Image: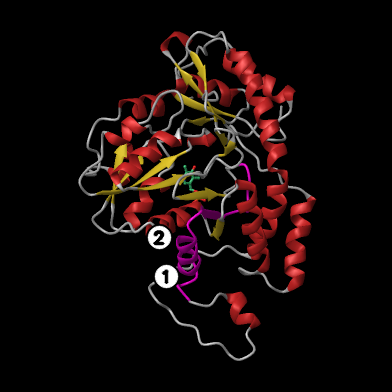
């Protein structure tokens, strides 16, 4: 019986050929393919500017920097997210302040954010958790009213929609991930998108040591150019090898989303009437790409999360404990940015589980997962 993974990137010959072409061209670092990927991504997401980066984590770092976040500021973040969301403000000497999330989507809301604003808050990072679009509009209004920068961590949300448009529009700056755990992958990689031209231009310079001339400009200059460095920048560049993969992957994104939504709906139907099981589902204002298909396990289910994980493992199926809570990690032990209890975050982190979902997952494999979830409780102790 073949083991079923929780996630597999959908990569094929076309990606390999695109990378071979880049190698043959002799230009493997950030160059023309990166520029082409940025243009294609901006068009797909209906935003004015896209700046490719080495990861979503570095895109978040740049997003906070161009938004003017400084050491000593407070930045509201959900604890219920991959730890990079909380780490990004920390890199700038700012303090991540944890907001709780709502149970239905796993996302922050205008109320959970408002509850933890301080006199020092200058920005909010809102996450589309597991691809589930957040309700941006009320948060947009709050940030405008208080003069706060709204940054969207859309790491998982390529292909999700909000009020009929691609998710990730409408924040001041949005960060994306192309890690293989997400839908669209370049191995490692990220993107910063924004409609603000000045911020895009500054991000473009900062990712390349804040040099005033790009590699392409230096390459095309006839006289040896004299570059200068206006501030302290970073090396957060994407390579053209990655961008070439990204271009191919972007062309497959709509098909990927369609397939994932089909599979998600099969899970939802299979578990619809099971007491104690709740599946992640689209909110009324948008659609998810189901980057993470999570189920919440309530007491009526009869098996707790650890027992269910043990059952799935026994049946040759990889699953994951649900999304983490950063404030429960040793890295944030004793952290001063925990201003209020986070009951929903802790509840979701303790009782959710992510099931296998990826483009190539066959129906008969998914049926094995469903049967395993619904099988009677193991007689052996959990954690075996
Ligand atoms: C994956 C992820 C990140 C980090 O992305 P990298 O590209 O690996 O840096 C950040 N935020 C969220 C919500 C994520 O899921």
Q: Nearer the viewer, residue 318 or 150?
A: 150
Question: Does 200 appear in magenta?
Answer: yes
Horizontal and vertical percent position of residue 301? 48, 11
Residue 77, can we see it? yes
- Taking the spot 41% from the left edge, 12% from the top edge, the residue there is 299
Q: In the image shown, does 42 or 24 lie closer to the viewer?
A: 42
Q: Would residue 334 be counted in the magenta stretch?
A: no
Q: Position of residue 270 (x, y in %)?
A: 63, 14
Q: Residue at x 73, y 61 (%)?
A: 19
Relative to 84, is 250 on the left or the right? Answer: right
In the image, is the residue at mark 1 within 8 Å of ligand 1 by its beta carbon?
no
Which is more N-terminal, label 1 or label 2?
A: 2
Camera-side mark, 2 or 1: 2
Q: Which image quadrant is residue 343 in? A: top left
Position of residue 291 measured from the top left corner of the image (x, y, whole percent):
58, 35
Dot label at residue 223: none
Disc 1: which residue? 233
Label 2 – label 1 distance at C-alpha:
12 Å
From the viewer's perspective, tell me whether residue 300 is left or right of residue 245: left
Callout 1 secondary element: loop
* Residue at image mark 2: 66
- The relative height of residue 69 versus residue 381 in the rendered view (above or below) is below
In the image, the segment drawn in magenta is 183-211
């Amino acid at each position: 019986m073949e083991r079923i993974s929780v996630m597999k990137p959908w990569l094929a010959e076309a990606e390999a050929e695109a990378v071979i072409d880049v190698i043959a061209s002799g230009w493997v670092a950030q160059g023309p393919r990166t520029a082409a990927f940025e243009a294609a991504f901006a068009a797909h997401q209906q935003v004015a500017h896209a700046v490719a980066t080495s990861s979503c984590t570095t895109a978040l770092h740049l997003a906070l920097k161009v938004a003017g976040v400084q050491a000593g500021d407070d930045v509201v973040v959900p604890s219920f997210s991959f730890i990079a969301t909380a780490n990004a403000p920390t890199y700038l000497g700012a303090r991540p302040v944890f907001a709780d999330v709502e149970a239905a989507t796993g996302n922050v809301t205008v109320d959970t954010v408002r509850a933890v604003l301080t006199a020092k808050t200058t920005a909010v990072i809102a996450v589309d958790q597991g691809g589930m679009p957040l309700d941006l509009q009320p948060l947009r209004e709050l940030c405008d009213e208080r003069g706060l920068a709204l940054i969207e961590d859309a790491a998982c949300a390529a292909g999700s929609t909000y009020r009929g448009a691609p998710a990730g529009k409408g924040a001041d700056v949005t960060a994306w991930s192309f890690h293989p755990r997400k839908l669209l992958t370049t191995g490692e990689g990220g993107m910063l998108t924004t409609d603000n031209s000045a911020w895009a231009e500054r991000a473009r310079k900062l990712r390349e040591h804040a040099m005033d001339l790009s590699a392409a400009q230096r390459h095309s200059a006839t006289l040896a150019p004299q570059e200068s460095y206006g501030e302290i920048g970073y090396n957060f560049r994407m390579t053209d090898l990655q961008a070439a993969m990204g271009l191919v992957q972007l062309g497959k994104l709509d098909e990927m989303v369609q397939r994932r939504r089909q599979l998600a709906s099969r899970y939802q139907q299979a578990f619809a009437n099971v007491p104690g099981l709740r599946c992640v589902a689209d909110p009324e204002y948008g659609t998810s790409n189901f980057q993470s298909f999570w189920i919440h396990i309530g007491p009526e289910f009869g098996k707790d999360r650890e027992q269910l994980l043990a059952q799935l493992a026994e049946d040759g199926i990889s699953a994951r404990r649900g999304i983490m809570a950063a404030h429960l990690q040793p890295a944030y032990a004793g952290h001063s940015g925990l201003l209020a209890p986070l009951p929903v975050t802790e509840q979701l982190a303790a009782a959710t589980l992510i099931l296998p979902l990826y483009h190539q997952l066959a129906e008969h494999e998914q049926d094995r997962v469903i049967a395993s979830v619904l099988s009677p409780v193991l007689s052996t102790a959990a954690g075996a």
